Image (cartoon, rainbow, N blue to C red):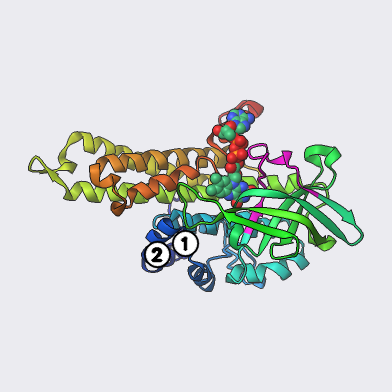
Amino acid sequence: MNFKFTDEQQLIAETVRDFANTRLEPVAEKMDKEDYWPHDLFKELGELGLLGPTVDVKYGGAESDYVTQTIILEELAKVSPAFALSIGAHSNLMVDNLCRNGNEEQKAKYLPKLVTGEHVGALCLTEPGSGSDALGMKSTAKLAGDHYILNGSKTFITNAPIADVGIVYAKTSPEKGKRGITAFIVDLNAEGVTKGQKMEKMGMRGSLTGELFFDDVKIPVENVMGEVDKGHRVVMSGLSAERATLAGISLGISEAVSQMALNYSLEREQFGEKIANFQMIQDKLANMYVETMTSKLLVYYAVSKVMENHKANREPAASIYYAAEKSTKLALDAIQVMGGYGYMKEYKVEKFMRDAKLLEIGAGTSEIRKLIIARDLIRTGSFE
Ligand SMILES: Cc1cc2nc3c(=O)[nH]c(=O)nc-3n(C[C@H](O)[C@H](O)[C@H](O)COP(=O)(O)OP(=O)(O)OC[C@H]3O[C@@H](n4cnc5c(N)ncnc54)[C@H](O)[C@@H]3O)c2cc1C
């Protein structure tokens, strides 16, 4: 057992930390205040080779792994969880999905521009009437000669207002229900695609979220990703990896807010003493350490499990469930340690609290994650 990152992973962590502190930090407040998306920084990340960590070298990627992907999200989230979320939607939800399920022609056509940052990617699964019950979607795609005609809408899609290409799921055989779904690679600037207004959110501002409307959109048959009517397999192929890596965002938040609370407690004086000397503050700091470290161990344990076996189920669900709930709690604890100043926007910790909450909802809610864990335990009859 070895709890150390490799030299290469360590180098990537340092590169992203430097990028986050020098390039992202100056715009993090503007992102939150104005729901501003720093497109130039997205492209810079592409130039640094950090948008396609898992992509094959032949398509311009780094041919690395999910640990590296998670490190990138963790480090970005320490400064801007919103930026990390958009990168996660692009690199993990969309690009990794294409790597796993696309054919050679599709990868050669789409990956290079996604890796350099010329194109922004999105994963389009959720619909107004189907969130947790994602496969209950209503969008349809009908075969008409050498193309499909896509109709329907998607909502809550990360990057939708600025995305160029999306993986879109639609029912090709509605009569077969959840076994009649197909995944398509869709040009989101094509005729018939309308991008709705960006949605106003409580947190994760600067990561643009929106609706997409498809009105008789023509999709060439060669843009079917995976097999026709087997879209449920494409959805399932990614869920574990998505949960495992996105949990890195929650981890980054926990680390950032815990550090803020510690720094503050070492400076703030009341009753003639540093507040770090008060036992009730120490209680919070000790719990912050334990809960952040537990998140870290669980997050990287789950990532390693998914790398061993793509179908690993309970570990990624447990990791994102725990890390997400703890990041919200720790952000609230940090506000408490920082007292009135913690409640002020200037001290930034309240922004992390608003951002943290999303991870208990997006990419599957806490309730669904617990169902997955419990069902897996019941199926195997074992806690191992
Ligand atoms: C900021 C943001 C970004 C997002 N980005 C994307 C994206 O890029 N792509 C994408 O496709 N989707 C995206 N989503 C959608 C996200 O995945 C869904 O919001 C999520 O799956 C929950 O669906 P819902 O919001 O419809 O809630 P619902 O499914 O309606 O759930 C409402 C409540 O009911 C509970 N519930 C539902 N079913 C059960 C059950 N069986 N047992 C117990 N409780 C249950 C839920 O846990 C929740 O508490 C995003 C969402 C947000 C908010």
In the image, taking residue 151 as reference, residue 353 lies left or right, namely: left
275 lies above or below 101: above
Residue at point 45%, 38% (across, down): 325
Mark whose residue sits in front, 1 or 2: 1
Q: Where residue 127 sits in the image (x, y, percent)?
A: 67, 44
Let me know if residue 30 is in the magenta part.
no
Residue at point 43%, 59% (across, down): 34
Which disc is residue 74 wearing?
Answer: none
The residue wearing badge 2 is 27
Q: Which residues are magenta?
A: 122-140
Nearer to us in this view, 212 or 338: 212
Q: Are marks 1 and 2 in contact (CB under 8 Å)?
A: yes
Query: What kind of residue is marked 2?
Result: Val
Residue lying at the far front of the rendered structure: 197
Which disc is residue 36 wearing?
Answer: 1
Residue lying at the far bottom of the rendered structure: 47
Q: Where residue 324 sits in the image (x, y, percent)?
A: 47, 42
* Marker count (numbered): 2
Residue at point 40%, 68% (across, down): 23
111 lies above or below 363: below
**Residue 306 shows in the view:** no
Residue lying at the far left of the rendered structure: 272
Judged from the image, the secondary structure of the residue bearing numbered disc 2 is helix
Q: Quadrant of residue 195?
A: bottom right
Sequence-earlier tag: 1 or 2: 2
Q: Give the dominant element type of the magenta stretch: helix, strand or loop.
A: loop
